[in-house]
Amino acid sequence: MKKDILGNHVYSGTISRAKFNEELDTSFILKYFAQRDFLQKNLCLPLKLIQEFDGEQGPFIEVAICNPDDIFYLALDLAKNLPRPLQKYPFVLRVCRKNVLIQTIDYVFTGQDIREALPDEDLVLDEDESEVLDLDLSSDGSTVDLLIHQIFKNALYTESSDIHIEPTPTAARVRYRQDGVLHIEQEYIKRDEYRAVVNRLKIAAGKDIAETRLPQDGGFFIKFQHRQIDVRFSSLPTVYGEKIVMRLLDAEHADMSMDQIIWDKNLRDIFLRSIETPHGILLVSGPTGSGKTTTLHNALLHLRNRFGNEKNIVTVEDPVEYRVAGICQVEAKQQIGLTFSRALRSIVRQDPDIILIGEIRDEETVNIAIQSSMTGHLVLSTVHTNDALGAIPRLQDLGARPYLIAATARLLQAQRLIRRLCDNCTHEVHDQDEMRILLERKAVPPRYHEEVLSKRIMKPNLTGCDYCHNSGYKGRLSVMEMVVVTDALKALIAAEADMEALTRQAVADGFRPMFEYGMELAGQGRTSLDEVLGLLSEQ
Ligand SMILES: [Zn+2]
């Protein structure tokens, strides 16, 4: 709980949709605050007068807001727009979700209640493809089934990629990751229901419900609007109980053409040329959630479509995230001793042409990758480094000899995902002053200022629209950098040159850092300055 300099209380927890509706006093709003435009523009809604708050005597005006970081001017503006007698009352500011707020403002002024209007398609939880568990709302399912149904529906309706169910001392909360950002969902699950939900999901994932002290992972399918969605389930014991994370892998969304993944034609040509070469190692780097798997998955689809039956394509992954017909995919299983390296040793005996290794993370795997490449195979894999050239010291740390890295590495790519501006509601362009402030606040190196300021850059619409679920962003874009391992660079790698020398050579060969590619995307109106500047602060 904190109090601002105007004496307003900021209540930091989010309020639930139900609680929000309960607090709402429509007649109070219409009597004192009938300025819909102001509320919509500033995303706030006075709820009612309260006499006491947190042991302090009021009256206070309770106000729902959705951005707790920027309340000072909002509170001031709001006070200014109130009738004089109410201006002296401090606010109790409570945070709620943006879409709930927008829908409720509509409701107050139109009387039309669309607040629960989620699409009502049937949702079916499918455990092992043969047994179908019907979780239709219309059936008299248990509370637990209804809750699970609602959680998945919220996730699918908002196009979330992950669902987090997190226990707290008294209850559990649900959060959803949308376009890479976690959003708090208002609906809290009661403690006893949480236990039942976890058990239900564990059964669906084929896991032991009695085991609560060790992490577990598994998966199941759900069917939604004639689509089948693969759900990867994992549980992790925390001090308050097991935290569940479910990743939704929508195979339809996973299949993109290479030109959707690599916007820049030049880089796309480099990438395709590299994967169509019969041997060598191609490495994709980036942190978890940077879209590496999607890029490689689509590279495999491209190769399958291009070479059809001519080539034997084999993968070893942990886990297999996207299933591809016509490709032989092996799932590494540490528990039974089927490690990456053990699976790989068998794969190289299976006459492969193209091998995808989910991740190179130990000495044996890196050596098999190098050997396979030397014996005429194409190896695609990922390494856990931040930038493209960082793959070289990483392979050395894992025990690879520099001259062997030089002999086999063909392309080093690094990538991140950034949010894409919503095509439907993005209209405004940054003016120069705004851009200058942004550049200074984000401490962008001065060498980039001129380039940034010379571009016409769109800014996100903060209130968004229906199409983008009021976020101003819709979907994500890969931003990447690529180092082609030229003969000159090979010589430096073999001679164990330092990073500075490697970078200088790469730049001479045409390498452009990821930030510059991001700026190009921003200049084309595909993403915001904020998203691109975020790439710099990460390094
Ligand atoms: Zn929009």
Image (spheres, rainbow, N blue to C red):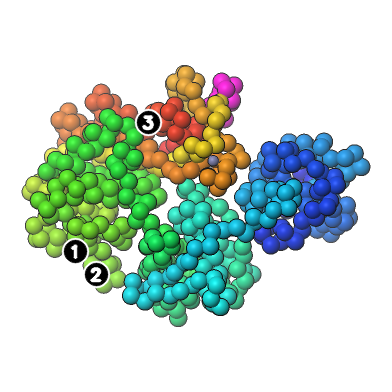
Q: Horizontally, is 222 left or right of 63 in the view?
A: left
Which residue is labeled 2 in the image? 337
**Mark 1 packing: few (<14 Cα in 10 Å), some, or many (20+)?**
some
Marks 2 and 1 in Cβ contact (< 8 Å): yes
Q: Given the image, on which type of amino acid does mark 3 rest? A: Tyr
Q: What kind of secondary structure does the magenta stretch mostly adopt?
A: helix
- Which kind of residue does numbered mark 2 sit on? Gly
Mark nearer the N terminus (2 vs 3): 2
Q: Is residue 193 above or below residue 270?
A: below
> Label 1 sits on what residue type?
Arg
Q: Which label sits on residue 369?
A: none
Ligand 1 positioned in quadrant:
top right
Q: Residues within 10 Å of mark 3 (few under 14, many from 20)?
A: some
Q: Magenta includes 439?
A: yes
Residue at 41 percent of width and 66 percent of height: 222
Q: Nearer the viewer, mark 2 or mark 3?
A: 3
Q: CA distance from mark 2 to mark 1?
A: 8 Å
Q: Identify which residue, 444 or 124, lies in the foreground.
A: 124
